[in-house]
Amino acid sequence: MLVAIEQLNGGFTNDALLIKNLTFYFGHMLVNITMYFGVAMVYEIMPVYTGRPWKTNKLVAASWNLGAAARDVCLSRIISIWTSRSRSGCR
């Protein structure tokens, strides 16, 4: 969408880092959401298929939470770098 706006409007230029990070973030979000739903389906189907309860432990929960926190930290770092570049007028 931003590329189309740049092509139609001669005075508007895109920031290459912004475009790269938006593509990276939203592309990975689609893959991650698909993967998480797949894992959730396995967690739901396996107890029915095997006929026994599915046991999880604190290590599994901690690793999922650590992964989510790492993603959030990286995203906030990307946003802070981009906004500091935008404010300083660097292109």
Image: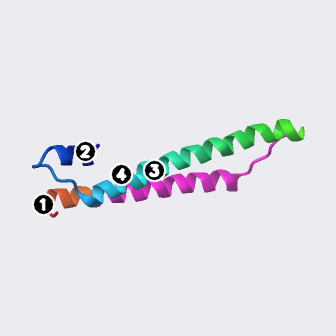
In the rendered image, residue 77 lying in the magenta stretch gets the answer: yes
Q: Which residue in the protein does label 2 denote?
A: 4
Residue 80 position in % (x across, y down):
29, 57
Residue 68: give x, y in percent of width and height: 52, 52
Between 73 and 12, the residue placed more toward the observer is 12
What amino acid does circle 4 point to?
Leu
Q: Amino acid at mark 1?
A: Gly
Alpha carbon distance from label 3 to label 1: 28 Å
The earlier-in-sequence mark between 3 and 1 is 3
Q: Quadrant of residue 52?
A: top right
**At numbered mark 4, what does the secondary structure look like: helix, strand or loop?**
helix
Rendering coords of residue 48 (x, y %): 84, 35
The span shown in magenta is 53-81
The residue that label 4 is drawn on is 22
Picture quadrant of residue 42: top right
Q: Which mark is residue 27?
A: 3
Q: Residues within 10 Å of mark 1 (few under 14, many from 20)?
A: few
Look at 18% across and 57% down and name the residue there.
Answer: 86
Q: Is 45 on the left-hand or right-hand side of 65?
A: right
Which secondary structure, mark 3?
A: helix
* Residue drawn at the location 61% of the way across and 47% of the way down: 35
Closer to viewer: mark 4 or mark 2:
2
Residue type (three-letter) at the residue carrying disc 3: Gly
Q: Quadrant of the C terminus?
A: bottom left
Callout 4–callout 2 Cβ contact below 8 Å? no
